[in-house]
Image: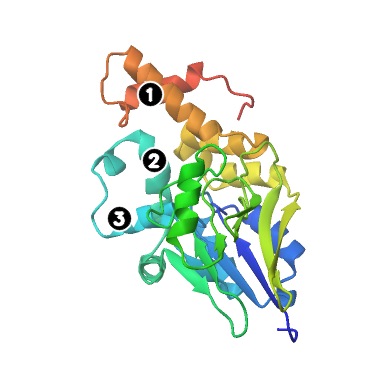
Amino acid sequence: MIEGRYRLAVLADIHGILPALEAVVADMQPGSLDEIIVAGDFLGGPQPVAVFSRLMDLGCRFILGNGEVNMLKMFRGRAPEAWWTHRQFDMGRWIYEQLDTKHLRFLENLPEQRVIDPPDVEPVRIIHGAPWDVNKLVFPHKEPDVFTRALRMVNENILVFAHTHLPEILRQDGKLAVNPGSVSNNLDGDTRASYATLTWDNHRWIPTLHHVPYDLGAVIQVFKSSGFLEDNRPLARAFLESILTGENTAMDYILFARQKAREAGYENTEIIPDEVWLAAEADFPWQFMF
């Protein structure tokens, strides 16, 4: 720590994409930082173990994201039966099977929130979703009441939140809120990786969003070579297309398959029958062929 200064980096929603993480690491220059915080959802993709190992090597501090919470539900036997039986949940099972007990025990010891409170520095609250629910998406503009509630629920004047894959810096009610966006898959049409730094200048935190281009061709290769793409189609295909476009193709596919299920006469479209889930791939308006 330089006298009078403290520099913190926050990475979120890496989703098991090592090429994106390596680009961010090169950009942020870890030696210039006092601390690196991982604000959840670091495992969920084709390289969960490699990403985990790299983050450990960097000496990061972690909180749980909804993806890691889901891994713990599976580990503890609390996951819904459909997670084990339906093709809709192939990706989650695939990621879980890459992890061993030491990874899962590590997750068990992680908090869902963390306060960064160095001496003589204003504390910063780090969360993944909302203060009351790690799964809750907080959209400050679309759902301003939810955002206001989130700010009011934390004692700190600085809140870092993630999960939406939408990088942003906001100020409201005397508080600063920072969303670092996603290291691997922003959903604002920008295919670059993003992360945030906060620098304490002896009086206040100065937030900065950083956008970093990375090798999308390498990501395609990783999806293929790991078996992640073929083992988990069609959702893995939608995830990859989302990375390549900056659009929320994964959610678009889920909604499309639910509509197909309704058309086929199914009432419960939260759990989509395998035949509908798989057949929807042929009719979905893909932008890329893999």
Q: Judging from the image, what secondary structure is the residue with disc 1 in?
A: helix
The three-letter code of the residue at mark 3 reads Lys
Q: Residues within 10 Å of mark 1 (few under 14, many from 20)?
A: many
Q: Judging from the image, what secondary structure is the residue with disc 2 in?
A: helix
Q: Earlier in the sequence, mark 1 or mark 2?
A: 2
Q: Earlier in the sequence, mark 1 or mark 3?
A: 3
The residue positioned farthest toward the front in the image shown: 173
User: Label 3, on which residue?
Assistant: 73
Which residue is more in the foreground, 15 or 113?
A: 113
Which residue is more in the foreground, 256 or 141?
A: 141
Mark on residue 90?
2
Q: What's the residue at 62%, 26% (across, down)? A: 289
Place of residue 152 in the rendered image (x, y in percent of width and height, measured from the top left): 46, 58
Q: Quarter-wise, where is residue 241 in the image?
A: top right
Instruction: Answer left or right for 5 relative to 267.
Output: right
Place of residue 121 in the rendered image (x, y in percent of width and height, measured from the top left): 62, 79
Viewport quadrant of the N terminus: bottom right
Place of residue 290 in the rendered image (x, y in percent of width and height, measured from the top left): 60, 30
Q: CA distance from mark 3 to mark 2?
A: 15 Å
Which residue is more in the foreground, 2 or 282?
A: 2
Instruction: Answer left or right for 100 relative to 175.
Output: left
Above/below status of 289 relative to 78? above
Q: CA distance from mark 1 to mark 2?
A: 16 Å
Q: Residues within 10 Å of mark 3 (few under 14, many from 20)?
A: few
Above/below status of 8 relative to 80? below
Tell me the mark number nearer the camera, choosing from 3 and 2.
3
Q: What's the residue at 41%, 60% (across, down)? A: 99
- Asked whether disc 1 touches disc 2, contact meaning CB atoms under 8 Å apart, the reply is no
- Asked whether disc 3 touches disc 2, contact meaning CB atoms under 8 Å apart, the reply is no
Q: Residues within 10 Å of mark 2 (few under 14, many from 20)?
A: many
Mark on residue 258?
1
